[in-house]
Amino acid sequence: TLYGQEKDSSTAGLARMNMILHDCPTAEIKQGNTLANPLFLDGDSLKTFDFAAANPPFSDKRWSTGLDPEHDPFQRFEGFGVPPDKQGDYAYLLHIIRSLKPTGKGACILPHGVLFRGNAEAVIRRNLIQRGLIKGIIGLPANLFYGTGIPACILVLDKENAQARKGIFMVDASKGFKKDGPKNRLREQDIHRIVDTFARRDTSDPRYARLVPVAEIASPKNDYNLNLPRYIDSTEPED
């Protein structure tokens, strides 16, 4: 079964329509604020899932409206830290983590800032890395999404064997796209390359993908900064 929650009523309606068109008429799409009022519950705690995927609003400045993060009834921020008032990116990510089963997997589209911003976000990022919850990071081309031109990345989460995870698989797919009017678009071959590289853990082209050891990420030089150019040099060599 598919479950979804969306705050905007017209987007929630579109999602329902999409589910019917894509042969999933039984999908449960509910409308409401996922952070302040999650609607998929198991008693007093969040319902947990095998997989979760999300494209939350980037750097949501109003993420804590209607919510007391310090005393969150669902303990989403416990053990990780509370995201800053004006940057809601990690709030959605931590909601996903709390909503996954012990072997659950997730993918979340977020702006690159989550990879390197400091202060409260740096604390959360360090906790996520130390627990091995981040399986991979895929850097996407700029200007893919409506409403913003900033480049985004996919954070791939995996709770299964998280404690034993010794590295994060990083892919810099920011160069593979075609211009399509004012936006950029991923071609079939770009998507195929990303999926293929990730599925096979293919590190044959270090300018495209690397399995970066946690020891390197945690070194004093990098200090848990996940910014992709630190680990993947994707500049073309000069002729």
Image (cartoon, grey):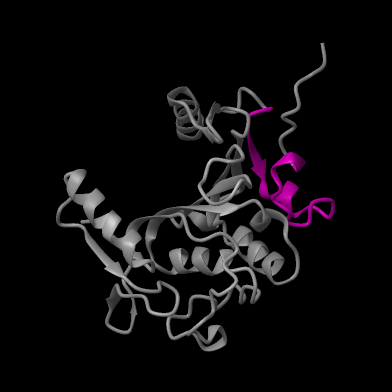
- Above or below: residue 134 compared with residue 101: above
Image coords of residue 83 (percent x, y): 62, 73
The residue nearer to you, when weighing 22 against 80, is 22
- Above or below: residue 205 compared with residue 71: above
Inspect the magenta stretch and tell me whether residue 218 lies in it: yes
Residue drawn at (61%, 77%), measured in percent from left and top?
82
Inspect the magenta stretch and tell me whether residue 223 lies in it: yes
Viewport quadrant of the N terminus = bottom left
Count of numbered labels shown in the rendering: 0
- Tell me the magenta residue range: 207-230
Residue drawn at (46%, 54%), measured in percent from left and top?
55
**Image quadrant in which you'd find residue 138:** top right
The residue nearer to you, when weighing 213 against 145, is 145
Image coords of residue 73 (percent x, y): 43, 86
The residue nearer to you, when weighing 180 against 55, is 180
Image coords of residue 116 (percent x, y): 72, 56
- Above or below: residue 192 compared with residue 17: above
Viewport quadrant of the C terminus = top right
